[in-house]
Image (cartoon, rainbow, N blue to C red):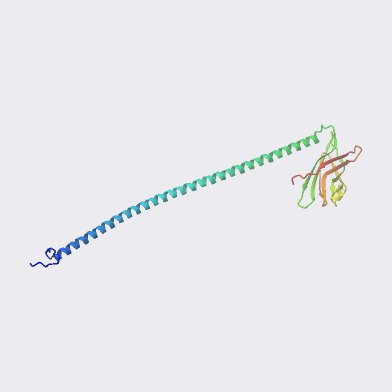
Amino acid sequence: MTAVKGSKQHRMVVVPYRPLYKAGVFLVFLAAMVTFSFVTYEYGMRQGLALKVAVVRERDQISVQLAEATRLIGEMRQEIADLKFGGEIDSRANEEVRQTVESLQDQIAQFQEEIKFYKGVMLPNAQEKGLRIERLDMVGTNVPNRYKYKLLLTQVVDKHEFVQGGVEIALLGRDGNTEAALSLSELNEAQTDAIGFRFRYFQNIDGELLVPSGFEPREVMIVARSSGKNGQRLEKKFNWQLSGG
């Protein structure tokens, strides 16, 4: 072969022409890529599935724990409610017992006072015998300035015979800046100044008083007079104090 001057010569390699070989190499490469992609996909799926299973399991555990905690909270709330209710019942029962005891004590004191009163009337041993102004009770009403009174007269004597006479009631207090005294007729138009009585052992005298507006009661004056040869005049003051109705 004749060399050509001025140009660089390259060695030429002659290879056989095999188109099926190239196609096979391409197919092998393609298969390898598909296999790699499938393996990667399966690995990812398995990892994702395992993670999902773990998440679901953890969620289920948390749900169980939450349900248990909710149940415990409900039981604790019920116990607290029971304790509070029991405490309220105990307090209420204690209060009822206390009120009952106080009521019984008041009744016992009242009975003792009544026994003492009846003993004093039926079996007198007091030095001062005769007519006595024993007790006065004042009670308010639903009408403003209107009050009910109950006056108790007794007779302490060795031999009980009928005693009779009259009793006067007056109200002492202030009318504005002035000291004033109101008679029974001024406090009750239907009542005279004297209320008659006649009894052997004791007598309760009931009535009502209508106090004028602006008048401030301070005391109630009771004057009792018995008739006969051994007639007496008694005078006793009671502080203005209302008792339970």
Residue 136 in percent (x, y) is at 80, 42
Taking the spot 69% from the left edge, 38% from the top edge, the residue there is 105
In this orientation, which residue lies closer to the viewer: 74 or 177? Answer: 177
**Residue 56 percent coordinates (x, y):** 37, 53
- The image shows residue 56, relative to residue 226, as above or below, that is below
Looking at the image, which residue is at 49% across and 46% down?
Answer: 75
The residue positioned 65% from the left and 40% from the top of the image is 98
Please identify the quadrant where the N terminus is shown. Answer: bottom left
Which residue is the extreme one toward the front? 6
- Along the line of sight, the residue nearer the viewer: 29 or 66: 29
Left-right relation of 51 to 230 = left
Query: Horizontally, is 161 left or right of 82 in the view?
Result: right
The number of callouts visible is: 0
Q: Residue at x 17, y 64 (%)?
A: 22
Q: Residue furthest right?
A: 229
Give coordinates of residue 204: x percent, y percent: 81, 43
